[in-house]
Protein backbone atom coordinates (compact mmCIF):
# COMPACT_ATOMS: atom_id res chain seq x y z
CA UNK A 1 0.00 0.00 0.00
CA UNK A 2 1.41 3.43 -0.94
CA UNK A 3 2.24 5.80 1.90
CA UNK A 4 -0.24 8.63 2.39
CA UNK A 5 1.50 12.00 2.90
CA UNK A 6 0.27 14.16 5.80
CA UNK A 7 -2.56 16.65 5.19
CA UNK A 8 -1.96 20.18 6.57
CA UNK A 9 -4.60 22.83 7.30
CA UNK A 10 -3.54 26.38 8.22
CA UNK A 11 -5.67 28.98 9.99
CA UNK A 12 -4.67 32.55 10.78
CA UNK A 13 -1.66 34.67 9.92
CA UNK A 14 1.10 34.64 7.34
CA UNK A 15 3.54 33.40 10.00
CA UNK A 16 1.37 30.33 10.58
CA UNK A 17 1.40 29.64 6.83
CA UNK A 18 5.19 29.98 6.86
CA UNK A 19 5.49 27.55 9.79
CA UNK A 20 3.19 25.04 8.08
CA UNK A 21 5.72 24.88 5.24
CA UNK A 22 8.45 24.17 7.82
CA UNK A 23 6.33 21.42 9.40
CA UNK A 24 5.78 19.82 5.99
CA UNK A 25 9.55 19.60 5.61
CA UNK A 26 10.03 18.17 9.10
CA UNK A 27 7.22 15.62 8.65
CA UNK A 28 8.63 14.52 5.29
CA UNK A 29 12.14 14.07 6.74
CA UNK A 30 10.72 12.04 9.64
CA UNK A 31 8.67 9.84 7.29
CA UNK A 32 5.34 10.75 8.91
CA UNK A 33 2.43 9.10 7.09
CA UNK A 34 -1.35 9.25 7.23
CA UNK A 35 -1.58 12.25 9.58
CA UNK A 36 -3.76 15.35 9.52
CA UNK A 37 -2.18 18.48 11.05
CA UNK A 38 -4.24 21.57 11.95
CA UNK A 39 -2.18 24.73 12.60
CA UNK A 40 -4.56 26.91 14.63
CA UNK A 41 -4.95 30.65 15.33
CA UNK A 42 -5.92 32.19 18.69
CA UNK A 43 -6.31 35.87 17.79
CA UNK A 44 -10.06 35.90 18.59
CA UNK A 45 -12.61 33.57 20.19
CA UNK A 46 -14.05 33.20 16.66
CA UNK A 47 -10.66 31.92 15.43
CA UNK A 48 -10.73 29.17 18.08
CA UNK A 49 -14.31 28.26 17.12
CA UNK A 50 -13.24 27.98 13.47
CA UNK A 51 -10.34 25.73 14.50
CA UNK A 52 -12.73 23.33 16.27
CA UNK A 53 -15.03 23.36 13.23
CA UNK A 54 -12.10 22.60 10.90
CA UNK A 55 -10.93 19.73 13.15
CA UNK A 56 -14.39 18.12 13.07
CA UNK A 57 -14.58 18.49 9.28
CA UNK A 58 -11.13 16.99 8.73
CA UNK A 59 -11.91 14.09 11.06
CA UNK A 60 -15.05 13.28 9.03
CA UNK A 61 -12.99 13.34 5.82
CA UNK A 62 -10.07 11.36 7.32
CA UNK A 63 -11.61 8.89 9.81
CA UNK A 64 -8.46 6.72 10.13
CA UNK A 65 -5.79 9.45 10.24
CA UNK A 66 -3.83 10.53 13.29
CA UNK A 67 -5.17 14.06 13.89
CA UNK A 68 -2.62 16.52 15.34
CA UNK A 69 -3.50 20.04 16.54
CA UNK A 70 -0.86 22.74 16.95
CA UNK A 71 -0.48 26.54 16.62
CA UNK A 72 -1.44 29.43 18.87
CA UNK A 73 -4.83 28.10 20.04
CA UNK A 74 -3.22 24.74 20.91
CA UNK A 75 -0.58 26.64 22.89
CA UNK A 76 -2.99 28.92 24.80
CA UNK A 77 -5.73 26.38 25.53
CA UNK A 78 -4.43 22.82 24.96
CA UNK A 79 -7.14 21.30 27.17
CA UNK A 80 -9.88 22.60 24.82
CA UNK A 81 -8.49 20.45 22.00
CA UNK A 82 -7.35 17.53 24.17
CA UNK A 83 -11.01 17.08 25.24
CA UNK A 84 -12.15 16.74 21.62
CA UNK A 85 -12.72 13.10 20.65
CA UNK A 86 -11.50 13.85 17.13
CA UNK A 87 -8.00 14.86 18.32
CA UNK A 88 -5.13 12.39 18.88
CA UNK A 89 -2.32 14.77 19.77
CA UNK A 90 -1.88 18.44 20.80
CA UNK A 91 1.57 19.99 20.30
CA UNK A 92 2.76 23.49 21.22
CA UNK A 93 4.21 26.25 19.07
CA UNK A 94 7.80 25.47 20.12
CA UNK A 95 7.36 21.71 19.77
CA UNK A 96 5.92 21.94 16.25
CA UNK A 97 9.23 23.34 14.94
CA UNK A 98 11.44 20.64 16.53
CA UNK A 99 12.60 17.61 14.47
CA UNK A 100 12.31 15.36 17.56
CA UNK A 101 8.54 15.96 17.71
CA UNK A 102 8.08 14.69 14.14
CA UNK A 103 10.63 11.87 14.47
CA UNK A 104 8.49 10.52 17.32
CA UNK A 105 5.59 10.16 14.84
CA UNK A 106 7.68 8.44 12.16
CA UNK A 107 7.13 4.82 11.07
CA UNK A 108 10.02 3.49 13.21
CA UNK A 109 8.68 4.89 16.47
CA UNK A 110 7.15 2.34 18.86
CA UNK A 111 5.19 3.37 21.92
CA UNK A 112 2.48 5.66 23.17
CA UNK A 113 3.02 9.42 23.20
CA UNK A 114 1.32 11.78 25.64
CA UNK A 115 -1.76 13.38 24.15
CA UNK A 116 -0.66 16.92 25.13
CA UNK A 117 2.89 18.06 24.38
CA UNK A 118 2.81 21.77 25.17
CA UNK A 119 5.62 23.36 27.20
CA UNK A 120 5.87 26.86 28.66
CA UNK A 121 6.31 29.09 25.58
CA UNK A 122 7.69 31.88 27.82
CA UNK A 123 10.79 29.76 28.49
CA UNK A 124 11.69 29.59 24.77
CA UNK A 125 14.66 31.86 24.03
CA UNK A 126 15.48 31.03 20.40
CA UNK A 127 13.62 31.25 17.12
CA UNK A 128 13.28 27.93 15.35
CA UNK A 129 16.30 27.29 13.18
CA UNK A 130 14.18 25.77 10.44
CA UNK A 131 14.19 28.23 7.55
CA UNK A 132 12.12 27.77 4.42
CA UNK A 133 13.69 28.83 1.14
CA UNK A 134 10.93 30.18 -1.03
CA UNK A 135 7.65 29.83 0.79
CA UNK A 136 5.06 31.86 -1.10
CA UNK A 137 4.31 32.20 -4.78
CA UNK A 138 6.99 31.84 -7.43
CA UNK A 139 7.29 35.63 -7.39
CA UNK A 140 7.48 36.49 -3.69
CA UNK A 141 9.19 34.73 -0.76
CA UNK A 142 8.60 35.25 2.97
CA UNK A 143 11.41 35.20 5.51
CA UNK A 144 10.62 34.93 9.22
CA UNK A 145 13.09 37.13 11.09
CA UNK A 146 11.35 37.37 14.47
CA UNK A 147 8.81 35.52 16.63
CA UNK A 148 6.94 36.31 19.85
CA UNK A 149 6.10 39.61 21.54
CA UNK A 150 7.27 41.38 24.72
CA UNK A 151 4.27 43.72 24.88
CA UNK A 152 1.03 42.98 26.70
CA UNK A 153 -1.79 44.80 24.91
CA UNK A 154 -4.93 44.21 26.95
CA UNK A 155 -6.94 42.72 24.04
CA UNK A 156 -4.25 40.33 22.81
CA UNK A 157 -3.68 36.63 23.61
CA UNK A 158 -0.85 36.20 21.07
CA UNK A 159 2.16 36.58 23.46
CA UNK A 160 0.80 33.57 25.37
CA UNK A 161 0.73 31.59 22.13
CA UNK A 162 4.03 32.83 20.71
CA UNK A 163 6.14 33.61 23.79
CA UNK A 164 8.52 36.53 24.25
CA UNK A 165 10.29 38.21 21.34
CA UNK A 166 13.15 36.27 19.72
CA UNK A 167 15.17 37.41 16.69
CA UNK A 168 16.94 35.56 13.89
CA UNK A 169 20.55 36.88 13.62
CA UNK A 170 21.16 39.22 10.68
CA UNK A 171 23.81 36.98 9.10
CA UNK A 172 21.39 34.05 8.96
CA UNK A 173 18.71 36.28 7.37
CA UNK A 174 21.12 37.67 4.75
CA UNK A 175 22.33 34.16 3.82
CA UNK A 176 18.76 32.97 3.34
CA UNK A 177 17.82 35.97 1.19
CA UNK A 178 20.90 35.39 -0.97
CA UNK A 179 19.72 31.81 -1.59
CA UNK A 180 16.24 33.06 -2.50
CA UNK A 181 17.65 35.59 -4.98
CA UNK A 182 19.81 32.83 -6.50
CA UNK A 183 16.60 30.82 -6.98
CA UNK A 184 15.08 33.69 -8.95
CA UNK A 185 12.82 35.41 -6.41
CA UNK A 186 12.32 39.10 -7.20
CA UNK A 187 10.72 40.09 -3.89
CA UNK A 188 11.34 39.10 -0.27
CA UNK A 189 8.98 39.98 2.59
CA UNK A 190 10.31 40.14 6.16
CA UNK A 191 7.75 38.71 8.60
CA UNK A 192 7.37 38.36 12.37
CA UNK A 193 4.88 38.73 15.21
CA UNK A 194 6.30 42.10 16.38
CA UNK A 195 8.70 42.96 13.57
CA UNK A 196 9.93 46.30 14.93
CA UNK A 197 11.21 44.58 18.08
CA UNK A 198 13.72 42.63 15.94
CA UNK A 199 17.23 42.72 17.38
CA UNK A 200 16.46 43.66 21.01
CA UNK A 201 17.61 40.20 22.19
CA UNK A 202 20.71 40.04 19.97
CA UNK A 203 24.26 41.22 20.88
CA UNK A 204 24.53 45.05 20.62
CA UNK A 205 20.72 45.23 20.24
CA UNK A 206 20.50 46.17 16.54
CA UNK A 207 17.25 47.64 15.17
CA UNK A 208 15.02 46.61 12.26
CA UNK A 209 16.43 49.50 10.19
CA UNK A 210 19.94 48.05 10.66
CA UNK A 211 18.73 44.70 9.30
CA UNK A 212 16.99 46.35 6.31
CA UNK A 213 20.09 48.41 5.43
CA UNK A 214 22.31 45.33 5.79
CA UNK A 215 20.12 43.22 3.50
CA UNK A 216 20.00 45.92 0.81
CA UNK A 217 23.76 46.45 1.00
CA UNK A 218 24.84 42.77 1.12
CA UNK A 219 22.27 41.44 -1.37
CA UNK A 220 22.56 44.00 -4.20
CA UNK A 221 20.79 41.68 -6.68
CA UNK A 222 17.55 41.65 -4.63
CA UNK A 223 15.10 43.83 -6.66
CA UNK A 224 12.42 44.33 -3.97
CA UNK A 225 12.39 44.13 -0.17
CA UNK A 226 9.10 44.48 1.67
CA UNK A 227 8.39 44.64 5.38
CA UNK A 228 5.12 43.40 6.85
CA UNK A 229 3.22 44.81 9.86
CA UNK A 230 5.15 47.28 12.03
CA UNK A 231 4.60 49.23 15.24
CA UNK A 232 5.25 52.82 14.10
CA UNK A 233 6.30 54.02 17.58
CA UNK A 234 9.25 51.56 17.46
CA UNK A 235 10.54 52.63 14.02
CA UNK A 236 14.23 53.59 14.24
CA UNK A 237 16.29 56.22 12.40
CA UNK A 238 17.88 53.71 10.02
CA UNK A 239 14.48 52.45 8.90
CA UNK A 240 13.40 56.04 8.20
CA UNK A 241 16.69 56.51 6.32
CA UNK A 242 15.95 53.39 4.25
CA UNK A 243 12.45 54.70 3.46
CA UNK A 244 13.99 57.97 2.28
CA UNK A 245 16.93 56.63 0.26
CA UNK A 246 16.32 53.01 -0.79
CA UNK A 247 14.04 52.58 -3.82
CA UNK A 248 14.31 48.78 -3.42
CA UNK A 249 12.47 49.03 -0.07
CA UNK A 250 8.81 48.95 -1.11
CA UNK A 251 6.65 52.04 -0.35
CA UNK A 252 3.97 50.13 1.55
CA UNK A 253 3.81 49.79 5.34
CA UNK A 254 1.14 48.01 7.37
CA UNK A 255 0.72 49.85 10.69
CA UNK A 256 -0.45 48.29 13.93
CA UNK A 257 -2.59 51.28 15.00
CA UNK A 258 -5.62 49.58 16.65
CA UNK A 259 -7.45 52.82 17.56
CA UNK A 260 -7.59 56.58 17.05
CA UNK A 261 -8.51 57.76 20.55
CA UNK A 262 -5.89 58.40 23.24
CA UNK A 263 -7.97 57.11 26.17
CA UNK A 264 -8.80 53.84 24.38
CA UNK A 265 -5.15 53.46 23.29
CA UNK A 266 -4.13 53.75 26.96
CA UNK A 267 -6.75 51.17 27.97
CA UNK A 268 -5.40 48.89 25.24
CA UNK A 269 -1.88 49.42 26.72
CA UNK A 270 -0.60 50.63 23.37
CA UNK A 271 2.63 52.63 23.43
CA UNK A 272 1.59 55.38 21.01
CA UNK A 273 -1.02 58.16 20.95
CA UNK A 274 -3.03 59.33 17.93
CA UNK A 275 -0.67 62.26 17.28
CA UNK A 276 2.28 59.83 17.15
CA UNK A 277 0.52 57.85 14.40
CA UNK A 278 -0.33 60.96 12.39
CA UNK A 279 3.20 62.36 12.78
CA UNK A 280 4.76 59.06 11.62
CA UNK A 281 2.48 58.82 8.56
CA UNK A 282 3.25 62.44 7.58
CA UNK A 283 7.01 61.96 8.00
CA UNK A 284 7.11 58.66 6.07
CA UNK A 285 5.14 60.23 3.23
CA UNK A 286 7.38 63.32 3.24
CA UNK A 287 10.42 61.04 2.84
CA UNK A 288 8.67 58.82 0.28
CA UNK A 289 5.77 60.61 -1.46
CA UNK A 290 4.45 57.37 -3.06
CA UNK A 291 4.14 55.62 0.34
CA UNK A 292 0.84 53.82 1.06
CA UNK A 293 -0.33 52.51 4.41
CA UNK A 294 -2.38 49.58 5.57
CA UNK A 295 -3.57 49.47 9.18
CA UNK A 296 -5.27 47.31 11.81
CA UNK A 297 -8.13 49.04 13.64
CA UNK A 298 -10.40 47.53 16.30
CA UNK A 299 -14.05 48.64 16.49
CA UNK A 300 -15.97 48.46 19.75
CA UNK A 301 -13.21 48.01 22.34
CA UNK A 302 -14.75 48.03 25.86
CA UNK A 303 -15.77 51.55 27.04
CA UNK A 304 -15.59 52.93 23.45
CA UNK A 305 -18.12 55.78 23.15
CA UNK A 306 -19.40 57.37 19.93
CA UNK A 307 -16.82 60.16 20.41
CA UNK A 308 -13.96 57.67 20.85
CA UNK A 309 -15.09 55.83 17.72
CA UNK A 310 -15.27 59.07 15.70
CA UNK A 311 -11.57 59.59 16.49
CA UNK A 312 -10.79 56.20 14.91
CA UNK A 313 -12.90 57.09 11.89
CA UNK A 314 -11.10 60.44 11.48
CA UNK A 315 -7.70 58.72 11.78
CA UNK A 316 -8.37 56.89 8.49
CA UNK A 317 -8.16 60.16 6.54
CA UNK A 318 -5.74 61.96 8.89
CA UNK A 319 -3.11 59.21 8.35
CA UNK A 320 -4.35 58.73 4.76
CA UNK A 321 -4.68 54.97 5.26
CA UNK A 322 -5.44 52.91 2.15
CA UNK A 323 -5.74 49.24 3.12
CA UNK A 324 -7.75 48.78 6.33
CA UNK A 325 -8.00 45.56 8.34
CA UNK A 326 -11.03 46.16 10.56
CA UNK A 327 -11.53 43.89 13.57
CA UNK A 328 -14.87 43.98 15.41
CA UNK A 329 -13.83 43.57 19.06
CA UNK A 330 -14.62 40.15 20.51
CA UNK A 331 -14.10 39.24 24.14
CA UNK A 332 -11.06 36.97 24.49
CA UNK A 333 -11.01 35.02 27.78
CA UNK A 334 -7.61 35.24 29.43
CA UNK A 335 -7.01 38.87 28.39
CA UNK A 336 -7.36 41.91 30.70
CA UNK A 337 -9.80 43.56 28.26
CA UNK A 338 -12.29 40.72 28.80
CA UNK A 339 -12.64 41.85 32.45
CA UNK A 340 -13.27 45.54 31.65
CA UNK A 341 -16.83 46.57 32.54
CA UNK A 342 -18.85 48.52 29.93
CA UNK A 343 -18.42 46.04 27.08
CA UNK A 344 -19.93 47.56 23.93
CA UNK A 345 -23.19 46.08 22.58
CA UNK A 346 -22.58 43.58 19.74
CA UNK A 347 -24.88 45.38 17.28
CA UNK A 348 -23.09 48.68 17.93
CA UNK A 349 -19.73 46.96 17.31
CA UNK A 350 -21.00 45.58 13.98
CA UNK A 351 -22.32 48.99 12.91
CA UNK A 352 -19.03 50.74 13.81
CA UNK A 353 -16.97 48.08 12.01
CA UNK A 354 -19.16 48.56 8.91
CA UNK A 355 -18.58 52.34 9.01
CA UNK A 356 -14.81 51.84 9.27
CA UNK A 357 -14.89 49.44 6.31
CA UNK A 358 -16.87 52.02 4.28
CA UNK A 359 -14.23 54.65 5.11
CA UNK A 360 -11.56 52.17 4.04
CA UNK A 361 -13.35 51.46 0.78
CA UNK A 362 -13.51 55.20 0.00
CA UNK A 363 -9.75 55.41 0.61
CA UNK A 364 -9.09 52.48 -1.74
CA UNK A 365 -11.22 54.13 -4.46
CA UNK A 366 -9.29 57.40 -4.02
CA UNK A 367 -5.95 55.58 -4.27
CA UNK A 368 -6.99 53.63 -7.38
CA UNK A 369 -8.27 56.73 -9.21
CA UNK A 370 -4.93 58.48 -8.57
CA UNK A 371 -3.05 55.69 -10.40
CA UNK A 372 -4.79 56.06 -13.79
CA UNK A 373 -2.28 57.22 -16.40
CA UNK A 374 0.69 56.42 -14.17
CA UNK A 375 3.39 53.89 -15.04
CA UNK A 376 4.12 51.23 -12.43
CA UNK A 377 6.62 48.44 -11.97
CA UNK A 378 4.46 45.37 -11.32
CA UNK A 379 5.56 42.01 -9.90
CA UNK A 380 3.55 39.29 -11.65
CA UNK A 381 1.93 36.78 -9.25
CA UNK A 382 0.32 34.84 -12.09
CA UNK A 383 0.17 35.42 -15.89
CA UNK A 384 -2.71 37.92 -15.60
CA UNK A 385 -2.27 39.59 -12.17
CA UNK A 386 0.56 41.33 -10.38
CA UNK A 387 1.12 43.97 -7.69
CA UNK A 388 2.59 47.45 -7.78
CA UNK A 389 5.27 48.54 -5.34
CA UNK A 390 2.41 49.87 -3.16
CA UNK A 391 0.86 46.35 -3.18
CA UNK A 392 -2.08 47.31 -5.42
CA UNK A 393 -3.38 44.51 -7.66
CA UNK A 394 -3.10 45.06 -11.43
CA UNK A 395 -4.73 42.86 -14.07
CA UNK A 396 -3.41 42.27 -17.61
CA UNK A 397 -5.36 41.04 -20.65
CA UNK A 398 -2.15 39.74 -22.24
CA UNK A 399 -0.34 37.00 -20.35
CA UNK A 400 2.94 38.04 -18.67
CA UNK A 401 5.77 35.95 -17.22
CA UNK A 402 4.99 34.82 -13.67
CA UNK A 403 7.57 36.19 -11.23
CA UNK A 404 8.79 38.91 -13.62
CA UNK A 405 8.73 42.64 -12.85
CA UNK A 406 6.82 44.32 -15.69
CA UNK A 407 6.60 48.07 -16.39
CA UNK A 408 3.11 49.07 -17.49
CA UNK A 409 0.79 52.08 -17.74
CA UNK A 410 -2.45 52.00 -15.76
CA UNK A 411 -5.48 52.34 -18.06
CA UNK A 412 -8.50 51.81 -15.79
CA UNK A 413 -10.09 50.25 -12.69
CA UNK A 414 -12.15 47.10 -12.11
CA UNK A 415 -13.47 46.85 -8.53
CA UNK A 416 -10.41 47.00 -6.24
CA UNK A 417 -7.96 46.22 -9.08
CA UNK A 418 -6.15 48.39 -11.60
CA UNK A 419 -6.08 47.46 -15.31
CA UNK A 420 -2.93 47.72 -17.39
Image (cartoon, grey):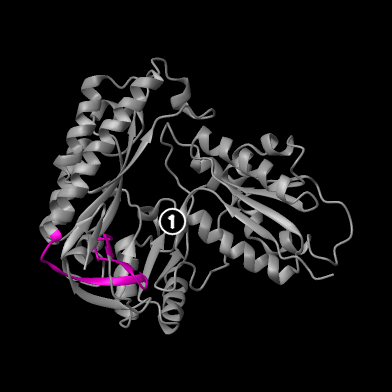
Q: Position of 251 compared to 191: left or right?
A: left
Examine the rendered structure and indicate whether residue 93 appears above or below residue 45: below
Residue of label 1? 192
Residue 285 position within the rendered picture, expressed as x and y whole percent measured from the top left: 14, 55
Q: Quadrant of residue 73?
A: top right
Q: Residues within 10 Å of mark 1 (few under 14, many from 20)?
A: many
Number of numbered discs visible in the structure rendering: 1
Residue 265 visible from this viewpoint: no
Q: Quadrant of residue 253?
A: bottom left
Q: Quadrant of the C terminus?
A: bottom left
The one nearer the camera, 187 or 288, is 187
Q: Quadrant of the N terminus?
A: bottom right
Which residue lies most toward the right here?
A: 110
Q: Secondary structure at mark 1?
A: loop
Residue 15 position within the rendered picture, expressed as x and y whole percent measured from the top left: 48, 56
- Residues drawn in magenta: 371-394
The one nearer the camera, 306 or 143, is 306
Residue 103 visible from this viewpoint: yes
The one nearer the camera, 62 or 189, is 62
Residue for point 66% across, 44% down = 57
Residue for point 20% across, 30% down = 311
Residue 237 position within the rendered picture, expressed as x and y whole percent measured from the top left: 22, 59
In the rendered structure, does residue 284 fall within the stretch colored magenta? no
Examine the rendered structure and indicate whether residue 333 appears above or below residue 322: above
Which residue lies most toward the top here?
A: 342
Q: Position of 13 compared to 328: left or right?
A: right
Residue for point 44% across, 62% down = 145
Q: Position of 302 compared to 322: left or right?
A: right
Q: Position of 355 compared to 79: left or right?
A: left
In the rendered structure, does residue 375 fall within the stretch colored magenta? yes
Amino acid sequence: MTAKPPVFATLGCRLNAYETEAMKDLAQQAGVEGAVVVNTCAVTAEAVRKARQEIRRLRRENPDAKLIVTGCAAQTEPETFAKMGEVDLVIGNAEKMQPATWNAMGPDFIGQTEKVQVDDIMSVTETAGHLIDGFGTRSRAYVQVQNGCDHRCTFCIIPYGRGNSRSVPAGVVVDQIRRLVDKGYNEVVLTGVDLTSWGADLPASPKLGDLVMRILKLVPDLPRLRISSIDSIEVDENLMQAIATEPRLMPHLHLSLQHGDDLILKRMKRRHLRDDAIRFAEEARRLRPDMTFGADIIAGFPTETDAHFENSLKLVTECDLTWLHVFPYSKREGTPAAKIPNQVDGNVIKERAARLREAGQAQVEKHLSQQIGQTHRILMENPHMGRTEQFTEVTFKTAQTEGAIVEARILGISGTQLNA
